[in-house]
């Protein structure tokens, strides 16, 4: 069973540009979440999607957005990039059983974004 | 929001030594996970342990939800155990959920 796949692995962008990151969850997992990791702030929650609906959103500006497709793949977009957006962006997927109880999160290898 | 504290922040061990990492959290949680972040940045799931004790090889974990803490035990440490260990707790509000991470314990295992 393939794990959570994130693309690209590395990205260098210029201030003011926008970027789109992609995440393919484990087959059968309908829940996808995104996290940002920086040395100063640690690991912080960005969004959670389930069956194409955003169920939860972290405390990030509106420049950060995301979506989930019908095949559960997810993308996140950051517009008008700032130097402080340089970070490791991690995606996680999880399964839910028929009783609507979740299993643990499985993380991808991340996308390392550098803004110059 | 919920606060998650991990201790110690840094730990240096000789190969073969045992260690205990602690995670305290400030409120009741639905679930708790321990992760190991490898040098390439990937978070590897170690345990999904809302309560009780689990063991996997040289690693074991115990969560005492009523007292709001969890412990990760590493026995007979190896150099490959080096890295950062994170505790993350989950609080669900209706259908919304998210993980709140601690600041991690950086472990270095030396020969």
Image (cartoon, grey):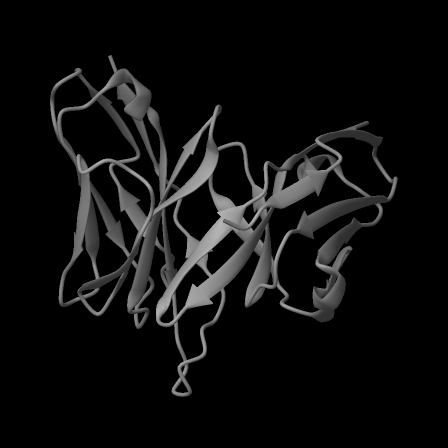
Residue A7 location in percent, x, y? 25, 41
Q: Is residue B109 above or below residue A30?
A: above
* Position of residue B31 in the picture relative to residue B13 (left or right): left
For the C terminus of chain A, which image quadrant?
top left
Residue lying furthest bottom in this view?
Answer: A99
- The answer to which quarter of the image holds residue A53 is bottom left
Q: Is residue A80 above or below residue B36?
A: above
Q: Is residue B54 visible?
A: no
Residue A41 position in % (x across, y down):
47, 30
Q: In the image, residue B45 lies at what x, y percent?
A: 55, 55
Instruction: Identify the residue shown where x is 59% and y is 36%.
Output: B103
Residue A8 in sight here: yes
Quarter of the view holding residue A82: top left
Quarter of the rendering occupied by the N terminus of chain A: bottom left
Residue A101 drawn above or below residue A112: below
Residue B17, above or below A82: below
Q: Residue at x 86, y 44 (%)?
A: B18
Looking at this view, is A48 or A12 the one in front?
A48
| Residue located at (13% from left, 67% from top) | A70
> In the figure, is residue B56 to the left or right of A101?
right
**Which of A105/A83 is in front?**
A83
Q: Identify the residue shown where x is 78% and y is 49%.
A: B74
- Percent position of residue A20, x then y: 16, 38
**Nearer to us in this view, A70 or A16:** A16
Q: In the shown orientation, is residue B5 left or right of residue B8?
A: left
């Amino acid at each position: 069973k393939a794990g959570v796949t994130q693309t690209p692995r590395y990205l260098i962008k210029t201030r003011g540009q926008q970027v789109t990151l992609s995440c393919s969850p484990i087959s059968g997992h309908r829940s996808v979440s995104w996290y940002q990791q920086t040395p100063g702030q640690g690991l912080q929650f960005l969004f959670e999607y389930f069956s194409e609906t955003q169920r939860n959103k972290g405390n990030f500006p509106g420049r950060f957005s995301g979506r989930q497709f019908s095949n559960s793949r997810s993308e996140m977009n950051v517009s008008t990039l700032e130097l402080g957006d340089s970070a490791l962006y991690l995606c996680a997927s999880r399964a839910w059983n028929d009783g609507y109880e979740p299993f643990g999160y499985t993380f991808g290898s991340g996308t390392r974004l550098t803004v110059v | 929001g919920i606060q998650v504290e991990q201790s110690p922040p840094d730990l240096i061990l000789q190969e073969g030594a045992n260690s205990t990492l602690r995670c305290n959290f400030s409120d009741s949680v639905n679930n708790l996970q321990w992760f190991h972040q490898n040098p390439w940045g990937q978070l590897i799931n170690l345990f999904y342990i809302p309560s009780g004790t689990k063991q996997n090889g040289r690693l074991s974990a115990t969560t005492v939800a009523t007292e709001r803490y969890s412990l990760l035990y590493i026995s007979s440490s190896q150099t490959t155990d080096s890295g950062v260990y994170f505790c993350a707790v989950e609080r669900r509000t209706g259908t919304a959920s998210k993980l709140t991470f601690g600041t991690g314990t950086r472990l270095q295992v030396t020969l």
